[in-house]
Amino acid sequence: MNPLKLRVTVFCLFLLLFKAPCYTEFEITVPRDTVTGFYSEALILRCSFPVDSSWDLQSTVITWQRGLDVVHRFYYSQDQLDRQNQHFVNRTSLFIQEMARGNASLRLDKVTLQDAGVYTCSISTNTGSQKKSFGVKIAAFYSEPRLQFSLLTDGVNLLVTSDGGYPSPTLQWLMQNSDITNRTQTHIAQDTQTGLYVVSSWLNLTKGTKTFLTFILHNNPLGQDLRRDIQLDLDKGERQGESAYRCHGCFIYIPVILLLLLLIVMSLLSVFITRRSRREQTKQNGFTEIKSKFLMENV
C-alpha cells in the first residue's frame, strides 16, 4: 500500500476509535465542457455534491447564478425565489427528492437564446462548501430545405430556403462533386422576435445544362448536416418560344392532373344525364296529360 494512503487510513481509524468524525474532501461536480441547450426545450444543468450519513437537508444551501443574476436558491428545505432574476421566473426547479443522493442539478424550461452564459453552482452543507462554474450555449435545428424553381429567359433559377436554426450556418454547393459555392448568392437574416436564422441561397443555371447538384447546410454546434441532391436537365430546344426544363421528381404532378380531368369529365357527364332524364320525364308527363284530356273529351 502507498505509504501516504496508509497514514491517512491509520489516522481515520484513530479518529473513529475516539468517536471523532473523519471527513473526506468536499468536492462538487459540474460539467467540464460547455453545455449545449436546445431552443424552446428543457435543459438540465448538472451539479452534484458528496453526502454521507451526517448530511442534513435543513443545513443545505444551494444557489445557482448566471453572472451576478440569481437563477435559483434553496435553503431551509425549500425554494427561496424572492431574489430570482425576472428572466428565469417560473422556468427553474431542483430535484428535491434526489437531493439526499447529492443531486443539486437545475432544470431550466423553455430555453431561449438569452439563456446562454456562464452558470455557477454553489453548495454549502454541514460537511463542507464549494462552488464551480461552466458555460452554456444555445442552439436550434434548421428546418428541412425547401426547393423552388423559377424559369428565366435563358435558363432557370434554383432557390433553397431553411429557417428556425441557430447559430448562423455554413452553406456549400457542389456540382458534379466540384465546389461552386462562390457562384451562388446567399442571404442570412435573424427573426426579429426569436433571433433564429432564416437562410436563402440561390443559383442561376443556363439552358443546355445537364447536371447533378448538391446543397449542404452545416449547423456545427449540433452536428446537423442537411444534404439535398438535385438533378437538373435543361433542354437546349425551345417549344413555342419557351425554354423547356425537367427536374427530377416533377412527374409526380401528371397523375394528379389526369385525376382532376377525369373528375371534371365525370361531373359534366353526370349533369348531362340528369338534365336529359328531366327532359324525358317532362315529355312523358306532357304526353300523359294530353292523353287524359283526349279520353275525357270522348267520354
Image (tube, grey):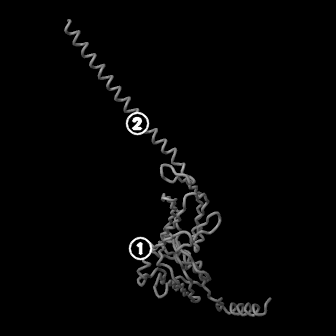
Q: Position of residue 129 (x, y in %)?
A: 57, 89
Mark 1–mark 2 distance (CA, rounded to whole Å): 49 Å
Residue 128's tag is none
State the residue lying farthest toward the top.
299
In the image, residue 278 sits, relative to residue 176, either above or below, namely: above
Residue 267's tag is 2
Q: Position of residue 65 (x, y in %)?
A: 49, 84
Residue kind at label 1, given as amino acid type: Thr
Q: Please tell me whether mark 1 sits on a helix, a strand or a loop.
A: loop
For residue 180, what is the image quadrant? bottom right
Q: In this orientation, which residue lies closer to the viewer: 114 or 127?
A: 114
Residue at the disc numbered 1:
192
- The mark that comes first in sequence, 1 or 2, is 1
Residue kind at label 2, given as amino acid type: Ser
Q: Does the residue at mark 1 contact the one at mark 2 (Cβ under 8 Å)?
A: no
In the image, residue 197 sits, relative to residue 127, either above or below, namely: above
Crowd band around label 1 with a 10 angstrom C-alpha radius: few (<14), some (14–19), many (20+): few
Q: Please tell me whether mark 2 sits on a helix, a strand or a loop.
A: helix
The N terminus is located in which quarter? bottom right
Residue beneath the point at 50% across and 71% down: 39
Residue beneath the point at 48% across and 52% down: 241
Q: In this orientation, which residue lies closer to the viewer: 251 or 125?
A: 251
Q: Is residue 225 rendered to the left or right of residue 293?
A: right
Q: Where is residue 106 in the image (x, y as percent from the top left)?
A: 52, 77
Crowd band around label 2 with a 10 angstrom C-alpha radius: few (<14), some (14–19), many (20+): few
